[in-house]
Amino acid sequence: MQEFLSAIQSGAPGDAIAAIAIPDIYRAAFVLRDEVGMFDGLASEDKDPRKSLHVSDVAVPELAPDEAYIAVMASAINFNTVWTSIFEPLPTFGFLDRLGKESRWGKRHALDYHVVGSDAAGVVLKTGSAVRLWRPGDRVTVHCNYVDDQSPSAHDDSILADNQRIWGFETNFGGLADLAVVKANQLMPKPRHLTWEEAAANALCNSTSYRMLVSKHGANMQQGDKVLVWGASGGLGAYAVQYVLNGGGTPVGVVSSEKKVDLLHDLGVEAVIDRKVANYRFWKDEHTQDESEWRRLGKDIRGLVGEDVDIVFEHPGRQTMGASVFAAKRGGTIVTCAATSGYMIEYDNRHLWMKLKTIKGSHFANYREAWDANQLVCEGKILPPLSAVHDLQGVGDAAYQVHQNLHEGKIGVLCLAPEEGLGIEDPELRAEVGEDRITLFRRHGA
Ligand code: NAP
């Protein structure tokens, strides 16, 4: 891979990159099938990704006709890598085994190691014989909607495809590695004003937040909407509040420290609740919720923005869903894509039906939505919330930070890129967007 790195860094043309032989092995971060029981009996928070994530050489798989090899310059941590590395709610080897039964090409994925990672920025090295729109040398980011487009179910809204998967979570050969194998329909142009690590941070969380809030498939946010955003400085939330601001709405961000409140204010979010200070106790005990605490949240929101919110951007799940359903206004929407604190959800259905509210499920994004969300990053209208950068050897530490909620925004991971700050192709656009704005989370995270 070092030969590829030298070629990329010297600006070699696509033909020269195409002429370099693909190696037999590459460096990757993975979990092992024979370690899936290593945390048995431990509480979730005690399961340590630093113990289960390994970095070593693995074999380069054969390339299918509709795929490309990518030199991964940088990747990023997503919560799904935390789930894989703590083997919750299920070990991901089951996903790989199912994919393995689908086809000759699917079979490559069913291995005793799972190379993880669902974000990447890098350079196309080689394309399969059926790839038409991309060629070696192209600088790209990768979205993680992995779809077999031969199924008719993939042709309305591809996230509804019956064999839709998340690359690097439900497939092997993910982005936390020096090389990745992706379908051509996962590729998008790299934002030219961003570094490799800034570019790699976006696709998964940015596209998910775009679908949840902006897309007609999600909450279909309108100008003037007020939106409650849980985890507003986290991976999803940091994009969500930007979409609300860009769309002429008013975000109400919820975070858990003074430092995060300051960060959101610097990002332009005026209405912020520090949930640690507010000390909401939505659950009296494991079985009973406290409606008076939901009411206290509602009052705090009205105190900040004058009325109830049109949309609640949900992902913490069990801890907050009852409060979220309560806090949405009459006719409002609760859009949810996750359940970090538990997926067996409880809410008071009277607040839903009597006030004609809607709970909308959402999952990642289709190619169109991911592309449109990426375009907004390319134009400098959505900023990368990159707060810290680790190298690939430190991937366990990076996942640990996210698991323990010690981070802000996104944590980047350098793969082939030898240092931070490389890969900017359009310094003029960078200056126009503003170095200070682009690096806001990085400076706060430092
Ligand atoms: P993240 O970077 O860890 O941010 C989540 C934030 O939520 C945390 O920083 C925390 O912020 C807040 N939070 C956590 N537990 C909470 C609780 N009990 N009550 C209130 N707030 C809580 O993670 P992320 O990348 O945003 O992902 C969030 C979840 O969405 C994960 O479960 C992930 O797997 C899922 N996800 C799903 C999709 C999909 O396509 N379906 C895509 C992306 C992510 P504060 O402590 O500051 O409040």
Image (cartoon, rainbow, N blue to C red):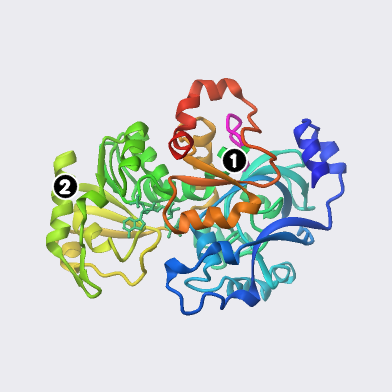
Is 33 rendered above or below residue 297? below
Query: Which of disc 1 and disc 2 is earlier in sequence?
Result: 1
Image quarter for ligand 1: bottom left
> Most prominent secondary structure in the magenta stretch?
loop
Query: What's drawn in magenta, residue-wise?
Result: 188-195
Q: Is residue 191 magenta?
A: yes
Within 10 Å of disc 2 (Cα), the crowding (few <14, some 14-19, many 20+) is: some
Quarter occupied by residue 190? top right
For the point 23% across and 63% down, which residue is it? 322
Q: CA distance from mark 2 to mark 1?
A: 37 Å
Q: Disc 1 on helix, strand or loop?
A: helix
Residue 119 x/y as whole percent: 58, 50
Residue 386 x/y as whole percent: 50, 40
For the point 42% across and 49% down, which residue is it? 236
Q: Which mark is residue 197?
A: 1
Q: Which mark is residue 31?
A: none
Q: Is residue 316 magenta?
A: no
Query: Mark 2 belongs to which amino acid?
Result: Asp
For the point 45% across and 68% down, which residue is it? 46
Q: Disc 2 on helix, strand or loop?
A: helix
Mark 2 — residue? 300
For the point 48% across and 36% down, which residue is it? 442
Q: Residue 156 or 298: which is nearer the viewer?
A: 298
Compared across the picture, whether 365 is left or right of 273 comes to right
Residue 135 seen from this side: yes
Residue 363 seen from this side: no
Q: Residue 24 or 127: which is nearer the viewer?
A: 24
Query: Mark 1 belongs to which amino acid?
Result: Glu
Residue 413 x/y as whole percent: 60, 47
